[in-house]
Image (tube, rainbow, N blue to C red):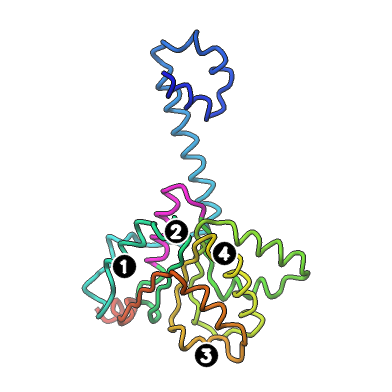
Amino acid sequence: MSELRERARALGLHGLVGRWEDVANADWLEELIADEEQARSARSFERRRAGARLPAFKPMADFDWTWPRDISRAGVDALMRLAFIERADNAVLVGGQGTGKTMIAANVAHQALLHGHTVRFEKAPELLETLAETPSRSELRRRLTMLARPRLLVLDEIGHVTLEGRHADILFAIVSRRYQRRSTLITTSLGFAQWDRIFPGASGIAGTVDRLIHNAALITIDSDSWRLRRETD
């Protein structure tokens, strides 16, 4: 009964706790508390899911592991277990367009939501362009602070378009604020050695890469495009 009382207290049911001696033996008490816990958990999940902004995605059960020429299934499974989030480590998925990077990232993000973590999923080029156009420094700082809060931030599609030095500076600011505090998962079509093609002339990109790969899980997908496969099937 003391455990049940603590659960009621944690839910903020102070009126119930205040007359605990009167209701402690009621048949309905445990069911009432369990129902309230379930309802609050569902509401919490819906709030976090809405804030995460996940794209539509297929479940990992639909991933054809026989299609890539090379991929670490054990590495993907480890990401799905979310231990890297508990350690505030990062994760990097490298592969060409249409190879399943976004699908994997979205599944990891969804799994994190199911386990109570806060998540934000962003298309990196659009996010960096939006932040670069922020009209004031104070507003930019406010938005960067918001991006530092989620336990998992997914930056998708780095490398799909060429970006500028100002975008590289903003990416550095995002990564630095989260470094060793919160986990960042990025998907990129180019390995880090080729990031000078994404951010030509950017001087601070080495510092960004250094923070991203420190204690990071790196998974490379060597595969032809799934989309081209469907078109030729």
Please tell me whether residue 194 belongs to the stretch shown in magenta.
no
Q: Position of residue 33 (x, y in %)?
A: 45, 24
Return the disc, 1 or 2, that comes first in the chain's sequence. Answer: 1
Q: Is residue 75 shown above or below 38?
A: below
Residue drawn 52% across the image and 90% down it: 197
Q: Dot 3, crowdedness within 10 Å: few (<14), some or many (≥20)?
A: some
Distance between mark 2 and mark 4 Cα atoms: 12 Å
First reached walking from the N terminus: tag 4 or tag 1? 1
- Nearest to the eye among marks 2 and 4: give it: 2
In this picture, which residue range is highlighted in magenta? Answer: 103-118
Q: Is residue 107 above or below residue 160?
A: above
The residue singled out by tag 1 in the image is: 75
Callout 2: few (<14), some (14-19), or many (20+) C-alpha neighbours within 10 Å?
few
**Identity of the amino acid at label 1?**
Gly
First of labels 3, 1 by sequence position? 1
Q: How many marks?
A: 4
Front: mark 2 or 3: 2
Kindly check if marks 3 and 1 are in contact, taking CB atoms under 8 A apart as contact: no
- The residue where tag 3 is placed is 197
The residue that appears at 40% across and 78% down in the rendered structure is 94
Q: Amino acid at mark 3?
A: Arg
Residue labelled with disc 4: 178
Which quadrant, please, contains the C terminus? Answer: bottom left
| CA separation in Å, label 1 and label 2 | 16 Å
Q: Earlier in the sequence, mark 4 or mark 3?
A: 4
